[in-house]
Image: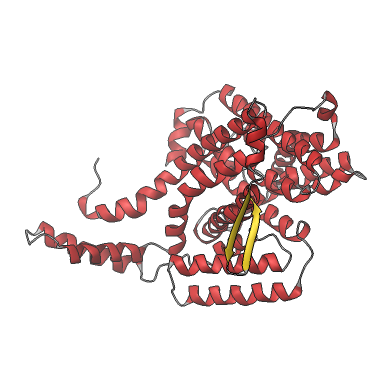
Amino acid sequence: MAEPAHRRPPLLFQSMVIDPLRSFARMEAAGGIVLFGAALVAFLLANSPWSEGFLSLWTTPVELRFGELGFQASLRQVINDGLMTVFFFVVGMEIKRELVEGELRRFRQAVLPAIAASGGVLLPALIFFVLNRGTPGEKGWAIPMATDIAFSIGCVLLLGSRVPRGLLVFLTALAIFDDIAGIAVIALFYGGGLNLLGLEWVAVLALIVFAAARLGVESAVVYAVGMVALWLGFHHAGVNGTLAGVLLGLLVPAVTRRPVREVLAALRSHSMKTLEGEERLDSGELLHVCDEVRAAVPPLQRFEHALHPWVAFLILPLFGLANAGVSLAGMALSSLTAPVFLGTAVGLFVGKQLGIFAFTWAAVKAGAAAVPGGAPWSRVYGVAMVAGIGFTVALFIANLAFRHAPELLSQARLGVLVGSLVSGLSGTLLLRLLPAPAARTVRAEAA
């Protein structure tokens, strides 16, 4: 039965607010496919007759100069330390959105994915540490900790109704907790030595941004300037500058300047004018209507949906191209038994699935939470396997851990590729081979 006309949202509000929300999950799947394609292209080119030119491309120096002030870095550093700040900005906003209005706002909803994420962080790190203890590769213990949200959600969404919605929500929340853990590890263990004066500047800048947010400042330019200033502050403080994006994302306002009811009332009055046969809205009135709709959308939601396509279809594929190009030339079979490769690949494939599943099972048996979506344990295990895809943040931490050890970095990258590929394929295959949920269960999930 059609929805009553008085209950339908205005078409403009529908197109600018509701439709982007519905397309967000679909974009995660598409972004994961594009990222996989970029990683595959990088790997193939790195092992092709054009490998020398492709690999040297990312070491091309990039220089930016204003008078006597200058900045120089390789193209790979510009992507990893610069563009990835925007990625972490989106991650920060996703975390805040989940804390304010998503699955993490209630303790009982958040406790199970938090416990599962703990298992998926601790066991892979422990496996890596045990295999590399006392070796130069020991510093990379955090590489297999993270779950790549774009890849993992993309794999699950491609399975459609075979994965209950409750499990999809569980995986999303788990990946967000993984991101939080990864961000904390980067800040605490992969800096360049803390500078207290730099940290003081970061605190002052954060207070300025926080005050601007509280005063209702919604200009994207203001937050862009704040991101650059925070990046410079973090860099001067000896902390990875990309964390500026996370901090800024957590500071962006998540509420509107005006109550949504008030905005909808104003839009309804404009709609009534046209329905009653009055003159059509002129350009000035249309601009006013657009401003009304814009006022109903929080800055966090606007920024997130504006930047998400750029991150999913440009920044992350560039990151994949720049970092997934592992050349197998000169690698012996002994490389597959190297501690760094084994710690990364086994940590992602074995450590992730066992850690997540064991901690989830223990939490449910202890009465801390119910099984997500009422799914059978076989499906929970399949999702735990998919969570072993650790591409983006794993490669990012590998670059930080082995910045000055190219051979270890190549082993870590290869381990990330192999561990993520095996996790994704085996988890997707298991979930695909399991009997499809009953139609009644699917309808209940949809409701």
Q: Residue furthest right?
A: 134
Give the residue at x 72% y 44%. 120
State the quadrant of the N terminus: top left
Residue 167 appears in view: no
The C terminus lies in quadrant: top left
Q: Is residue 250 above or below residue 329?
A: below
- Point 35% across, 48% down: residue: 19
Q: Is residue 348 left or right of residue 244?
A: right
Task: State which quadrant residue 234 falls in.
Answer: bottom right
**Residue 235: % across, % down:** 68, 64
Tell which of 242 and 445 is nearer to you.
242
Q: Nearer the viewer, residue 322 or 50?
A: 50
| Residue 3 rendering spot, x and y as whole percentages | 25, 46
30 vs 352, left or right, is left
Q: Is residue 199 above or below residue 332?
A: below
Left/right of residue 139 with respect to residue 234 in the rendered view: right
Would you say 103 lies left or right of 7 here?
right
- In the rendered image, residue 204, in percent from the top left (x then y), is placed at 62, 77
Between 358 and 27, the residue placed more toward the observer is 27
